[in-house]
Image: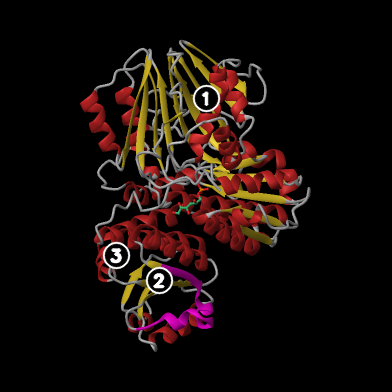
Amino acid sequence: MCGIIAAASNRNVGKLLVQGLHKMEYRGYDSAGIALHQKDQIAHLRTLGKVKLLEEKMIAEKPKSKLGIAHTRWATHGKPNQVNAHPHKDQSGNIVLVHNGIIENYDPIKKFLRSKKVKFKSETDTEVLVQLIGYFFNKGKLNFEQSVRAALQRVDGAYGIVVLNKKEPDVMIAARRGSPLVLGIKDKEFFIGSDISPIIKHTQQIIYLEDAQMAIIDGDDYKITSINEDVSLPKKVEKIDFKIDDYDKGKFKYFMHKEIHEQIDTIRNTITGRTKKDSIMLHGLLDYWPEIKQADKIFITACGTSWHAGLIGKNLIERFAEVPVHVEYASEFRYNKTLVDNNSIVIAISQSGETADTLAAIKKANDYGAITVGICNVPGSSVSRETNCGIFTRCGHEVGVASTKAFTAQISILYLLALKLADSNDTMSKKAIKEHLDYDEGIKKIKNILNKENEIKKIALKYKNANDFLYLGRGLNFPVALEGALKLKEISYIHAEGYPAAEMKHGPIALVDKDMPNVFIVPKDKTYEKIISNIEEIKSRKGKIIIVTDSKDKILKDLANDLIYVPKTNHYMFCVLATIALQLFAYYIAVGKKLNVDRPRNLAKSVTVE
Ligand code: F6R
């Protein structure tokens, strides 16, 4: 989604703001802009398209400033163009603002402001907010802080904003509701970011602003206060331990490729320290474990790839611990009739920890009295703060828009959780649990898949011109099929659907012809014979067959146009290995089509609007 970086310093901030925008390019955007305070005026530059174009403008105009705000926009209200790009100004030019999120009641506010002779330049909901702040400020009765507060008390929706005022060259106000904002502090320098990626280079001392909080930077000093009232709130400064390396591509051309390769380490980091012989320690759940282990039903909610992880979690928890699990898209959970109550456990899965629908689902579950459990990759994120308890995936920052390492870490956590529940519920023997926890050999086998990269690339390139794909798997591998299809469509723009393999007969088979590739995920397990029948059905309709399997059986060689072998492991590791093979497959199709894998069209890394 949109990205914000702001800075107040004794040095010139223009360059560091542009560098910060570059760091957020991974999030996806269509235009960029910057506003720099210059004592009695505010320099205001905006461009459609890449940050590089804004940078060129900056180099040409050389604006100097010690206080500034910058933004990359991902259009919601109004087309991507220069007029709709942020920062936006009020009509007097006194107030300048950058905004992430959506102002839902922009229409009545706009009508009100028009009745007061305010003229609008853009089609954005954001301009309504800056004009409203300006309206209060220019009346002269409220100071800057009071004007921002008064305006925010009248808007509905989600926002993370940073605002400047032409009359106060040392003051910058940030506020959030729904959309994340972090404040970085270093001696007498201040940085504000929509996430830590643009500011980590400058400081690791961070305050995660909470919902309805404002931060007021005034010269060398700052305070945290509330949108609702003028109170002074505690400054909760945390030291974050993300590595700057997470934001570098190293030897890889794309972050997605780097992150696919990191999975041996990220899975190991996620599991390490949480298992000992036959026991599993999930310290983050300790306080609520008595209730969690007694749950007679578990709900899982998430979006996109994290939702696919949730489906794998359901399969594992039902299989190991015999507890029924209901998995629901967060966007549906938040509005559907819910059967959640104060005996329920609701697990929310989110890489970013900032997905708007997932946060709304958590809020609803909290309101119904459920125990909420977060599985999340970002310490300090909203999901980690809004849930009662939780477990972090330990992947480091995931930059690639297409989620890869977060997915395999999420399933690793769900695997541990399922085994721990099985242990508490006595649904599995200690011996069986111990066998499952002997994961090290399995993790090493990831290397084997990564070593097959060139083979997978060759196969992928054969299919790069296909228009449609089916991905088919059963049981644990049905979500793997969904995830494989999602990866392909996100980065290569090829239509792809995932189905339970047998379900394909109930409609999708009508799509199959000689040009259509069908990716089958085929572990040698109890559904093996059944899935072979499904392959035969496609074969007899002349569909192309790509098989991902751990079986060397001749029948598969006879049926397949192409085979991707993964080494033999257990069920859980098979789905991790198959997933990684499919990540590489999608990656090389997109690269073969010369697409920018890290910046897929229309997509943003973290979906912070509904
Ligand atoms: C797909 C992808 C998205 C996210 C989804 C949820 O590659 O990245 O589908 O999985 O937007 O995001 P998080 O996990 O951050 O809540």
Q: Residue at x 32, y 53 (%)?
A: 597
Is label 1 within 8 A of ligand 1 (CB to nearest ligand atom)? Answer: no
Instruction: Tell me residue 136's x, y (percent).
Output: 58, 23
According to the picture, the residue beneath numbered tag 2 turns out to be 549
Q: Is residue 55 magenta?
A: no
Q: Callout 2: few (<14), some (14-19), or many (20+) C-alpha neighbours within 10 Å? A: many
Q: Amino acid at mark 3?
A: Ile
User: Closer to the N terminus: mark 2 or mark 3?
Assistant: 3
State whether residue 383 appears in this view: yes
Range of magenta residues: 496-513
Mark 3, secondary structure of its residue: helix
User: Closer to the N terminus: mark 1 or mark 2?
Assistant: 1
Q: Nearest the camera: 238 or 328?
A: 328
Q: Residue at x 59, y 61 (%)?
A: 316
* Gap between marks 1 and 3 measured at Cα: 57 Å
Mark 2, secondary structure of its residue: strand
Residue extending farthest to the top is 220
Left or right, residue 28 beside residue 313:
left
Mark 1, secondary structure of its residue: helix
Instruction: Tell me residue 321's x, y (percent).
Output: 67, 59
* Gap between marks 1 and 2 measured at Cα: 62 Å
Instruction: Tell me residue 552's x, y (percent).
Output: 37, 76
Q: Amino acid at mark 1?
A: Gly
According to the picture, the residue beneath numbered tag 1 turns out to be 134
* Gap between marks 2 and 3 measured at Cα: 13 Å
Compared to 530, does 41 lie above or below? above
Q: Residue at x 45, y 59 (%)?
A: 576
Per the rendering, the mark at residue 456 is: 3
Instruction: Tell me residue 39's x, y (percent).
Output: 38, 12
Q: Is residue 512 magenta?
A: yes
